[in-house]
Image (cartoon, grey):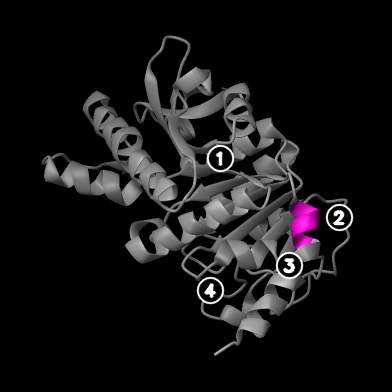
Amino acid sequence: MPTLFDRAQIIAETLPYLQRHHGATVVIKYGGAAMTDPAMRRTVLHDLVLLRQVGMNPIVVHGGGPEINAMVDRLGMTTTKVAGYRVTDAATMAVVEMVLSGGTNKELVQTINACGGNAVGLSGKDGNLLRVTKFTPGGADIGFVGEVSAVNPAVIRDLVAAGYLPVIAPIGVDDAGQSYNINADTAAAAIAGALGADKFIMLTDVPGVLLDVKDPGSLVSSVTVRDAQSLIDAGQITGGMIPKIGACLDAIARGVARCHIIDGRQPHALLVELFSDGGIGTMVVPDETTLAPLPAPPTVGTESR
């Protein structure tokens, strides 16, 4: 067990990172197993309060797929998916908004505040934060599923300036005032870009990008936009990791400096990523960033976090 002096030394070693990130805006997409497990959830939210306390500006955009599925099942409704997206008719949209905005969002806010934070919950409908257009993957009509067309970051900036930690449910509206469900990854990327965030961090239930999904040693620690696209084209990034990388590429295209995909199931994953050079997971950076060449696994890139 570490002694008190050992703990003091660890705290002292965080000084360069605290200085580097003081005042930084960090958009965190929160979902997956890290959100559904109560113990993990409290650890993550506790760490968000710590980030705010040391002078950073965390903004949370959360998902809630498992909670929506549970409510749909409870109500005896059916779930249909097209190209991986939930077909969202009017009745399903009412459930989605009830669960995300009225349930999950408020539970996260309550826990953050219980940890000593000062969180405020909102959805993309508040202050016209997220305006959307209808999303039709491959031309298919999947109902009230939207893609972000415009972001009004003023409401977030005002809350942060007033000392609050914003927690955002990915619900938006179109020009007619109709509510739409938005993929949380893409909503978070759009918000990060509109804020000019210093970092966009995706808390997931995987270690990051693996060149071999069966080999944890094949983790790609850092990759440029160009190389990330090459890995997708080569079939080395597949399945559910493709939309996560896509969200990172979108955030970088919108001006975000660094994007990170990390395993939110790991205790204090956010703190490890932000307050150590090695970090964990996969970092995605603009093409002009100098990284080591992209070799075979397990080591890709050494650029400092």
Work out whether mark 4 precedes mark 2 in sequence or the reverse, and give the earlier one: 4
| x and y percentages locating residue 11 in the rendered image | 69, 71
Relative height, residue 289 to residue 84 (above, below)? below
Nearer to us of marks 1 and 4 is 1
Discs 4, 2 touching: Cβ within 8 Å? no
Q: Which residue matches tag 1?
A: 188
Work out whether mark 3 precedes mark 4 in sequence or the reverse, and give the earlier one: 3
Q: Amino acid at mark 2?
A: Thr
Judged from the image, the secondary structure of the residue bearing numbered disc 2 is: loop
Nearer to us of marks 3 and 4 is 3
Q: Nearer the viewer, residue 284 or 156?
A: 156
Q: Horizontally, is 286 left or right of 49 in the view? A: right
Judged from the image, the secondary structure of the residue bearing numbered disc 1 is: helix
At x 63%, y 29%, the residue is 157
Q: Which residue matches tag 3?
A: 14
Q: Amino acid at mark 4?
A: Val
Q: Which residue matches tag 2?
A: 289
Nearer to us of marks 3 and 2 is 3
Which of the 4 quarters of the picture holds residue 260?
A: bottom right
